Amino acid sequence: MSMTPDLYPRSVNWQITYGCQLRCTHCYTESGRRPARRLPPESLLRIAETLAAMKPQSIQIGGGEPLLVPGLFEVAALLRAKGLQVHLYTNGLDVTDEIAEKLVQLFTHVHVSIDGATREVHEMIRGRTGSFDAALRALGALERARNAARARGECDFQYGIDVTLVRSNFAQLPLFCSVIAPAFPGLSFISAGAAVPAGLAGRPSYAEQELLTEEQLATLRDPRLTEELRALAAASKAGIEQLDINDNFFLQLNPEQVRRGEPATQVMEIEPDGGVRGLLIYEGTVGNILHEPAQVLWQRAQQRLRDPFLVKTLAGVRTLQEWAVAARKIDQHFAAPRDLLRLSRRPEHVASAPQKKIPGGSNYPRSRDSASQL
């Protein structure tokens, strides 16, 4: 059977677990606050075989925290053996030198999530003391593993930083280029995108208090910002190859985007138990990839993009706050009963988890003042 982009997605987001050690204030999947829904290794390999048969351009493995999942490395090995690009998204807490060596061998890209250029801001957003130092240790381990791979003549690996931009960290964006990146010469990319109203980031109070303002979005969209950040990185001798600054409105899936067939309409999102979401970032599944053919599920997802309710709800949405209202309506409309129950129990104000210290030392200073002390 011919596997064209019309029959199968161009990319796959696989949320492989909802288990997580952090309690991020904006978490799109509410990971760490709901059942992990993790599958046994044999089921994960079945899904991996199905995904490989679709021949997408890339597979993004996230969560939750993927490194908590037994069988993750076997899944990655299978996908890489099929010639696929495989990205891993991690909070970095479990990335030791030994783990970093495996990541370099099994993934084409590793994204370490850092949501503050200082310890105080990062840990306020991500809800755990020690998580900033742990993320920096992970970057250091990946740097060493990458250098070792290059010395062996193995160069097919990139690592970098992913930043979710909210009002609390927006002013720190330059520090990622001028302070964090120079500490890791092999850092390949920095990807910084505005938080979108999905999951906990879609709550009314969060939308009003933390989603970026129109002025901040205008700054983000101005090409001069990227030029200034590149100049900062160059002046600080950071070796960043890619700098992606995005307002993330391409994730909205409004009628005009669907009509144009924009990239976000060509992504399949898979939940930890194999459920296939009908819409990227919004609640609601169209079936399970363990029980039904992938092509059938993809056709259903494509049909949902044109659902009259979705079209009506997103038509005319322009601001993040308007999008947040629309996203809540879409979630209520398409969510399964168990997810509707979860949504009804979601507290309007989600406090950070109790501050738990992560064991282990750090080579980085423990001052709360500024990452400029790196």
Image (cartoon, helix red, strand yellow):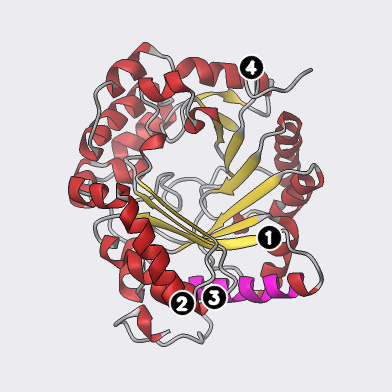
Q: In this view, does 196 lie to the left or right of 277?
A: left
Q: Mark 1 touching mark 2, by CB under 8 A? A: no
Amino acid of disc 3 = Phe
Q: Where is residue 316 in the image (x, y as percent from the top left)?
A: 24, 23
Q: Which of 161 and 25 is in front in this view?
A: 161
In this view, the mark in front (1 or 2): 1
Amino acid of disc 2 = Asp
Residue under pointer 2: 133
Residue under pointer 4: 296
Main secondary structure along the magenta-highlighted residues: helix
Query: What element does badge 1 sit on?
Result: loop
Does the magenta-highlighted stretch encompass residue 105? no
Identity of the residue drawn at 30% across and 51% down: 220
Q: In this view, does 23 lie to the left or right of 273?
A: left
Does the magenta-highlighted stretch encompass residue 145? yes
Amino acid of disc 1 = Phe
Identity of the residue drawn at 46% across and 18% down: 304
Query: What element does badge 3 sit on?
Result: loop
Q: Position of residue 166 (x, y in %)?
A: 29, 55
Q: Is residue 306 above or below residue 51?
A: above
**Disc assigned to residue 40:** none
3D distance between C-alphas at marks 1 and 2 = 23 Å
Q: In this view, does 64 lie above or below 258?
A: below
Label 3 neighbour load within 10 Å: few <14, some 14-19, many 20+: some
Q: In this view, does 34 lie above or below 22?
A: above
The tag earlier along the polypeptide, 2 or 3, is 2
Query: What element does badge 2 sit on?
Result: helix
